[in-house]
C-alpha cells in the first residue's frame, strides 16, 4: 500500500516521469567521471529524501526503494545502488548500528569505540541492510519529540517510561533510532530499574544542555512514573467494566429480571470501591512526584542564589548597588509597558483603507503640480506672451505711419525688434517695407 502511494506521489511531483526518453536517461547506470553523472545523482538523492520527508519515513528499506518505489513496468533504476552508497558516504543516510546503543551499557559502548579506533571498518553494502535512517528526518523527529515533552513539563529535564517514549516517537524502531541520536548528542540517557518488574525509561534534557550523571533519585522517579501509568491503566479498565455492568443492569431492569439487575448492582458497588482505592493511591503517588519536582526547583533556585552571591562577592559589588540596578531595571520595564499600552490604544496604519491612501496621494500630487505652475512659469508660456506684446506694438506703429509713393520707392523701412524668450536665446523680428 505504501509503495502505491509513493509511486502516485512521484508521478505527480516529478516532471516527465512517464516520458520514455527521459526515463531511459535517468535509469541508466553511472559511468565515467563524477562530473558526468553528478546531476543525476542529485536528482535521485533529492527525490529519495523528498519522498521520505513527505510520508515521514524515518526508516527506509533499500530493497523497497530499489524494487518498489521507482518501478516502472518492471524497470528499476540501475544507478540506485551507487546512489544509496554515496548517500551513506556523504551522511544523508546512516545505519542503526552506526549510532551507539545506550541500552547496551557503558562497558559495551566503550569497547565499541575502542574497536572502531583500532580497526577501520570496511565500507558496508547499503543495499543489503534491512533498514537505513534518513539523517535529516532523524534530526527533525528528535526535535519534535523534545518539543512535545517540553509542552507537558516545566522543568529543564524530564523522565518518561519507554512505552510512552515509543508512543511519542511513533513505534519501537523509531524510538530506538531517536534515542540513539539524542544519547549521542548527550541530551538523553537510558534508564532501567529492576524491582518487582523490569522498568525502562528515558531521561531527556528539555533545555538543550547535556545531562549530568544518573542518580538514584532518577531511578526512583522512573519507578513512580511507571506506577502512575499502571494505576491509570487500572482505572481505565475499572471504568470500562463499570459501564458494561451499568448497561447490563439497565437492560435487566427493562426486561423485568430484578434478580439479575441486583447482581449487576453489587458489581457496580465493588467497582466503585476499587476505583476509590486506586484513585487514592494514584493521588498519593502524584503528590510524591510533585514534592520531588518542587524540591528540584527549590534546589535550582538555591544554586542560582549561591552563584549570584558568589559573583557579587568576587566582583566586590555591594547589595545597595544591586538594589539600585534592579530598581532601574524595573523602571525601564514599566516605561516599556507604558509605551506598549499607548501604542495599543492608538489606531495602527493597517486600519486605514488602501483607497483612502491612494486618494490622499493623488491630492498631494495635484497640489505640487499647481504650486509649480504658479511660482515657476514654463519658458514656452513666457516666450509666447512676449511675442504677443511685440506684435501689438508693431501693429500700432504701422497704423500711425504714413508713407508717400516717393519715399516708398526710394528706400526701405527696416524695423528690428528683439524679443527675449526667458532662458532661450533672443529672437529678432524683422519687417521690411518696400
Image (spheres, rainbow, N blue to C red):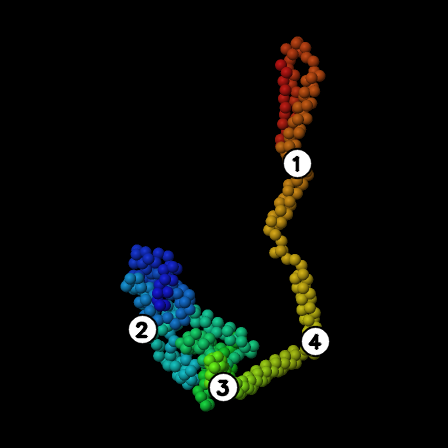
Asked where in the image residue 332 lies, by quadrant, the reply is: bottom right
Question: Which residue in the protein does label 1 denote?
Answer: 377
Question: Which residue in the protein does label 4 denote?
Answer: 323
Secondary structure type for disc 1: loop
Q: What is the number of the mark on residue 46?
A: none
Say left or right for 344 vs 95.
Answer: right
- Measured in 3D between alpha carbons, the distance from the residue under mark 2 to the one under mark 1, in whole angstroms, is 88 Å
- Measured in 3D between alpha carbons, the distance from the residue under mark 2 to the one under mark 3, in whole angstroms, is 65 Å
Residue farthest along the bottom direction in this orientation: 196
Secondary structure type for disc 4: helix
Question: Which residue in the protein does label 2 denote?
Answer: 128
Is tag 2's residue or tag 1's residue first in the polypeptide sequence?
2
- Residue 54 in the image, given as x and y percentages of width and height: 42, 65
Q: Residue at x 30, y 58 (%)?
A: 24
Is tag 4's residue or tag 1's residue first in the polypeptide sequence?
4
Label 3 crowd (10 A; few <14 / some 14-19 / many >=20):
some
Question: Which residue in the protein does label 3 denote?
Answer: 262
- Residue 359 in the image, given as x and y percentages of width and height: 62, 47
Of marks 2 and 1, the one in the foreground: 2
Looking at the picture, tell me which residue is in the foreground, 167 or 336: 167
Label 1 crowd (10 A; few <14 / some 14-19 / many >=20):
few
Is there any visible trace of residue 422 in the rendered image? yes
Label 2 crowd (10 A; few <14 / some 14-19 / many >=20):
few
Of marks 2 and 4, the one in the foreground: 2
Amino acid at each position: 500500500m505504501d509503495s502505491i502511494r509513493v509511486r502516485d506521489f512521484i508521478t505527480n511531483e516529478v516532471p516527465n516521469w512517464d516520458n520514455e526518453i527521459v526515463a531511459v536517461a535517468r535509469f541508466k547506470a553511472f559511468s565515467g567521471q563524477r562530473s558526468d553523472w553528478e546531476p543525476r545523482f542529485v536528482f535521485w538523492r533529492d527525490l529519495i529524501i523528498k519522498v521520505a520527508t513527505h510520508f515521514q519515513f524515518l526508516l527506509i528499506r533499500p530493497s523497497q526503494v530499489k524494487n518498489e518505489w521507482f518501478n516502472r513496468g518492471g524497470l528499476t533504476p540501475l544507478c540506485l545502488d551507487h546512489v544509496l552508497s554515496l548517500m551513506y558516504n556523504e551522511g544523508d543516510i546512516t545505519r542503526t548500528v552506526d549510532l551507539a546503543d545506550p541500552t547496551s551499557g557503558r562497558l559495551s559502548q566503550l569497547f565499541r569505540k575502542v574497536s572502531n579506533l583500532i580497526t577501520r571498518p570496511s565500507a558496508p553494502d547499503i543495499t543489503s541492510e534491512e533498514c537505513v535512517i534518513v539523517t535529516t528526518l532523524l534530526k527533525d523527529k528528535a526535535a519534535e519529540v523534545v518539543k512535545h515533552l517540553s509542552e507537558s513539563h516545566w522543568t529543564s529535564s524530564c523522565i518518561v517510561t519507554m512505552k510512552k517514549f515509543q508512543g511519542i516517537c511513533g513505534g519501537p524502531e523509531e524510538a530506538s533510532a531517536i534515542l540513539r541520536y539524542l544519547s549521542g548528542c548527550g541530551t538523553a540517557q537510558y534508564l532501567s530499574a529492576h524491582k518487582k518488574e523490569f522498568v525502562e525509561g528515558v531521561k531527556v534534557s528539555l533545555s538543550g544542555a547535556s545531562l549530568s550523571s544518573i542518580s538514584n533519585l532518577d531511578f526512583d522517579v522512573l519507578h513512580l512514573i511507571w506506577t502512575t501509568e499502571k494505576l491509570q491503566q487500572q482505572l481505565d479498565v475499572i471504568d470500562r467494566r463499570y459501564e458494561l455492568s451499568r448497561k447490563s443492569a439497565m437492560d435487566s431492569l427493562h426486561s423485568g429480571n430484578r434478580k439479575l439487575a441486583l447482581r449487576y448492582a453489587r458489581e457496580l458497588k465493588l467497582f466503585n470501591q476499587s476505583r476509590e482505592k486506586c484513585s487514592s493511591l494514584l493521588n498519593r503517588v502524584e503528590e510524591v512526584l510533585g514534592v520531588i519536582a518542587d524540591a528540584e526547583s527549590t534546589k535550582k533556585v538555591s544554586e542560582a542564589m549561591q552563584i549570584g552571591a558568589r559573583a557579587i562577592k568576587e566582583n566586590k559589588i555591594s547589595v545597595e548597588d544591586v538594589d539600585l540596578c534592579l530598581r532601574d531595571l524595573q523602571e525601564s520595564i514599566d516605561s516599556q509597558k507604558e509605551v506598549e499600552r499607548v501604542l495599543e490604544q492608538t489606531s495602527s496604519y493597517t486600519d486605514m483603507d488602501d483607497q483612502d491612501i491612494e486618494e490622499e496621494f493623488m491630492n498631494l500630487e495635484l497640489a505640487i503640480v499647481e504650486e509649480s505652475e504658479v511660482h515657476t512659469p514654463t519658458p514656452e508660456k513666457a516666450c509666447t506672451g512676449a511675442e504677443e506684446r511685440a506684435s501689438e506694438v508693431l501693429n500700432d506703429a504701422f497704423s500711425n505711419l504714413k508713407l508717400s509713393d516717393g519715399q516708398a520707392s526710394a528706400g526701405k523701412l527696416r524695423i528690428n525688434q528683439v524679443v527675449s524668450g526667458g532662458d532661450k536665446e533672443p529672437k529678432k523680428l524683422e519687417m521690411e517695407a518696400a
